[in-house]
Image (cartoon, grey):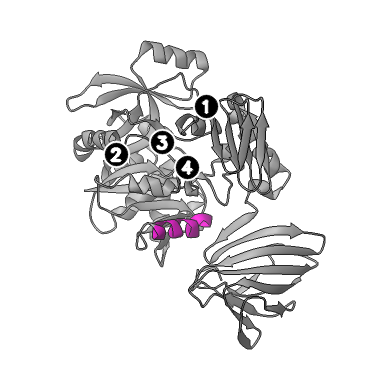
Amino acid sequence: MIVPVIMAGGFGSRLWPISRQQHPKQFLPLIDDSSMLQTTIRRLEGLTSVPPQLICNEQHRFLAAEQLRQIGLEDANILLEPEGRNTAPAIALAAMRVMQDGKDPVILVLAADHYIQDVSAFHASVLTALPFAESGRLVVFGINPTSPETGYGYIEQGMSLDGGGYEVKKFVEKPKLSVAEGYLKQGGFLWNSGMFLFRASSFLKELKFFQPEIFDICREALSEGEEDLHFTRINAKIFSACPDLSVDYAVMEKTANSVVVPMGAGWSDIGSWSALWDVGSKNEEGNILKGDVLVHNTRNTYVHSESRLVTAVGVDDLVIVETKDSILIAHKDSVQDVKVIVDKLKSKNRSEFLCHREVYRPWGSYDSIDKGNRYQVKRISVRPGAKLSVQMHHHRAEHWVVVSGTAKVTNGKESYLVTENQSTYIPIGQVHALENPGKLPLELIEVQSGSYLGEDDIVRFEDRYGRS
């Protein structure tokens, strides 16, 4: 039995402005209409029928749950990290979680944001690795390199083993270009994919030997955690003391029990805009054009428009990305430096690094369409049957105008329906709630007014999503 463990942490800052801290790339439809997470799960069809163990950051729990619901996995367990502590603790928590029922399955560790072109080849490599994992070995999948890539770690193959694997001679951190060129010319080096296959107990045994502090903290944090609906919440206070280490540094580079299995499946970690251009479907000029885009005399360029017309004339090898609140223009050779822009936004305390103008919530979404000194206007969409928390604000009043659908409004001690072209007013300090009792989406305009309009001016009294 193979239990998939899917790591959906991380923020994908090099794909800003599409990927942001509150809505990162693994939850976005970058290649087709499905999110990267959903595509990763669907890739497992025909390989295993066991529901995945998903592990993600606490702040992404509702995004993850909704995307699992959309593909029929409402009952799948989601392991919530209170904070990111790198891949070694994440895998440790997942391995311990899947062993809680007394079983010791082989776990297939995958990242939620990888692209794999050839699913059949992916399955074949996993099945090649399975006997090694069942026998207690720790398998890492190596990708046959196609270029001297400096953004990946490398694995040097050692002695060939019966069954299609190789001993691991050494792991190499991301090399300089000249070194990567030498690896490609020499042969025998594979890209480190960050995908693994091993028995849960085999990994934990090695982790306990090499990193006993991580093992002990993860075990205690999980045992002192809580089960909440389909979420497993890790004890935040205990977990905060856990060392921040990658699984490669913590275990794989140290163990003598590792095996590398080559994989030629058209893999990419979609770690930058140029990587997304590499795997995308291009026109005759080598362009990828998404959204309302017009170009002339433009080649080998990625253009993404979210909310308006974007045009390009006489350019080559560029990335142009437009969202409702930001525009990125970068040369494809410099896209790794997009992270520098994100760091600058963060240092200036600008919201653009954190969230999009349109923000998703477990009940639906809102789009901040206008903002002034003492007012803010939002377009709010509430899913059928969903309800916002029972709440109040100390510093703002709200005026709601229903555009489509029907709203059930709790306003103090009153409860009433508001339909299309009707409105209602919520005074400062009034306890209130908004619900969509119908079968169609509820769309409304909210006008906030007051001295402070921040999202942290919310006092929740009741909440069906566990946020009160």
Secondary structure at numbered mark 1: loop
| Residue kind at label 2, given as amino acid type | Leu
Instruction: Estimate how packed mark 4 is, as few (under 14), some (14 to 19) or many (20 or more) residues with alpha carbons within 10 Å.
Output: some
Numbered disc in front, either 3 or 4: 4
Q: Which residues are magenta?
A: 58-70
Mark sitting earlier along the chain (4/1): 4
Mark sitting earlier along the chain (3/4): 4
Residue 447 shows which numbered tag? Answer: none
- Residue on which disc 2 sits: 197
Instruction: Estimate how packed mark 2 is, as few (under 14), some (14 to 19) or many (20 or more) residues with alpha carbons within 10 Å.
Output: many
- Residue on which disc 1 sits: 286
> Disc 3 and disc 2: Cα gap in Å?
16 Å
417 on left or right of 250:
right
| Residue kind at label 3, given as amino acid type | Ala
Q: Is residue 60 magenta?
A: yes
Secondary structure at numbered mark 2: strand
Tell me: residue 219, above or below residue 315: below
Which residue is at a point 55% across and 50% down the rendered structure image? 23
Instruction: Estimate how packed mark 3 is, as few (under 14), some (14 to 19) or many (20 or more) residues with alpha carbons within 10 Å.
Output: many
Q: Nearer the viewer, residue 100 or 116?
A: 116
> Disc 3 and disc 1: Cα gap in Å?
41 Å
Residue 250 shows which numbered tag? Answer: 3
Mark sitting earlier along the chain (3/2): 2
Residue 86 shows which numbered tag? Answer: 4
Residue furthest bottom in the image: 413
Mark sitting earlier along the chain (4/2): 4
Whether residue 437 is visible:
yes
Tell me: residue 89, above or below residue 227: above
| Residue kind at label 4, given as amino acid type | Asn
Numbered disc in front, either 3 or 1: 1
